[in-house]
Image: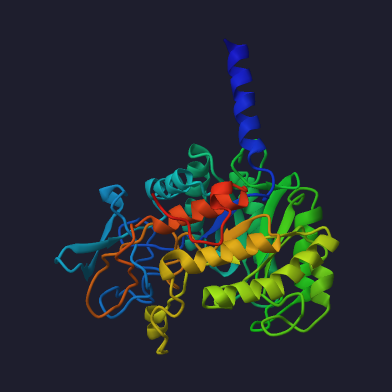
């Protein structure tokens, strides 16, 4: 009996690890996991639903309303918003394990491979809030194992001040020590790439923020070579024009010197085009050349696709005006045009931004097409089922798996 149990355990570990290596043929999503709600025991109120303690009609920071109908009732948080029939509109918090479990179940149901869990380095300054970040991380890991999905950690450098790079290094050391993140034996759902745990550093080379080449080099050296905490493959999130060093990218050849040391390059293209035709033109002109550059340097390439964009409510809290539904989803035609064009350009995998981004209206998880009414506007495509973009993202995965049924520029039909 003991021998049988050992064999079974060995097979389980091997199975988990065997699905975890490499990005080829996979479609992954970004997972913000940043929403909080009163009653979730985080102590952070309506974080990311609002900029203040007020979350009410006329004051919110989301342009999509989540569909929480499949979550446990105890994890559905009532708000001051009301649907057209007068019923109370509710939201969620990923601090709750059962909620995250449902999200990963959806990934499994629709064939999405997993997520890049976003972790803003500046948010780790506060030990209390960092505890909630750790809880979301553990929720993701547990759900990934249960539903045979994958996850990997993305450190977002946005807002990091010069000299603060050690915040990131110390956070990673703590996660490795306390939670065995990326461990082959303790974290079997963690995404491996080229035989090593993949870590993402997002925000290198953007021209709209301070840049520190020495700090970036320190991070690359640490994650690659540290004898105790290194040994990682590295992906970097970079500007759209990283290769040509213009527009949204710093005009400094040192960026290329850094990038030649990493394993995966992922340019951020959200908002760089707004129609299917514009997406096709951008990908044909820019992505094709990006892929050629990466092939020469033996670097993998993970392009970014997004379903649409809207952030009117968020901008209103900043006393700014923004067009509602700035980049229309077109019932999925916009997203599919990117998927198809990337595939035609030669991309082998895809990052969909994002799974749960309500703030900028890019979420692909189940959201309400019967959102609250009143002083705040929310996106809705009333002719579509609430899971349309989960389904379409699953079809994108079939496309990158070369399924002949999805090898078409035409938007897939749902039967």
Q: Is residue 1 above or below residue 249?
A: above
Callout count = 0
| Residue 90 horizontal side relative to residue 112, left or right | left
Residue occupying the point 47% across, 51% down: 135
Provide residue 280's location: percent of width, then percent of height.
61, 72
| Residue 176 horizontal side relative to residue 262, left or right | left
Q: Please, which residue is most extreme toward the top here?
A: 1
Residue occupying the point 77% across, 49% down: 231
Provide residue 329's location: percent of width, then percent of height.
44, 70
| Res 267 quadrant in image | bottom right
In the foreground, 311 or 388: 388
Provide residue 209's location: percent of width, then percent of height.
65, 82
In the foreground, 30 or 301: 301
| Residue 357 horizontal side relative to residue 19, left or right | left
Q: Is residue 62 visible?
A: yes
Q: Is residue 113 visible?
A: no
In the foreground, 277 or 136: 277
Q: Is residue 196 above or below residue 256?
A: above
| Res 238 quadrant in image | bottom right
Provide residue 413's location: percent of width, then percent of height.
43, 55
In the foreground, 58 or 160: 58
């Amino acid at each position: 009996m003991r021998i049988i149990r050992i064999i079974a355990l060995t097979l389980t570990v091997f199975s988990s690890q065997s699905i975890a290596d490499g990005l080829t043929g996979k479609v992954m999503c970004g997972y913000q996991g940043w929403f909080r709600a009163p009653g979730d025991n985080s102590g952070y109120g309506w974080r990311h639903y609002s900029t203040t303690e007020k979350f009410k009609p006329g004051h919110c920071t989301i342009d999509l309303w989540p569909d929480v109908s499949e979550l446990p009732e105890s994890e559905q948080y009532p708000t001051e918003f009301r649907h057209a029939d007068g019923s109370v509109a509710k939201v969620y918090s990923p601090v709750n394990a059962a909620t995250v479990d449902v999200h990963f179940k959806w990934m499994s149901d629709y064939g999405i491979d997993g997520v890049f869990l976003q972790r803003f380095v500046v948010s780790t300054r506060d030990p209390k809030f960092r505890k909630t970040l750790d809880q979301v991380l553990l929720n993701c890991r547990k759900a990934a194992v249960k539903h045979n999905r994958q996850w990997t950690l993305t450190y977002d450098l946005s807002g990091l001040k010069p000299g603060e790079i050690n915040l990131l290094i110390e956070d990673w050391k703590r996660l490795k020590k306390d939670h065995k993140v990326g461990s082959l034996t303790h974290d079997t759902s963690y995404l491996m790439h080229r035989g090593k745990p993949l870590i993402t550093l997002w925000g290198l080379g953007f021209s709209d923020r301070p840049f520190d080449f020495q700090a970036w080099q320190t991070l690359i050296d640490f994650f690659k070579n540290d004898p105790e905490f290194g040994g990682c493959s590295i992906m970097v999130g970079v500007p759209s024009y990283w290769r040509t060093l213009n527009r949204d990218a710093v005009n400094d050849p040192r960026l290329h010197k850094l990038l030649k040391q990493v394993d995966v390059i992922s340019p951020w293209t959200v908002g760089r085009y707004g129609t299917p035709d514009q997406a096709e033109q951008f990908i044909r002109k820019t992505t094709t050349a990006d892929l050629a550059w990466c092939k020469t340097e033996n670097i993998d390439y993970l392009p970014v696709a997004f379903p649409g964009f809207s952030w009117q409510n968020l901008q209103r809290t900043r006393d700014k005006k923004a067009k509602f539904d700035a980049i229309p989803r077109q019932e999925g035609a916009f997203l599919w045009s990117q998927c198809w064009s990337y595939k035609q350009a030669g991309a082998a995998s895809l990052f969909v931004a994002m799974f749960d981004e309500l703030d900028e209206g890019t979420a692909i998880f189940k959201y309400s097409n019967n959102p609250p009414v009143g002083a705040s506007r929310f996106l809705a495509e009333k002719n579509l089922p609430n899971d349309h973009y989960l389904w379409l993202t699953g079809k994108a995965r079939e496309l990158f798996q070369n399924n002949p049924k999805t090898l078409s520029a035409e938007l897939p039909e749902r039967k």
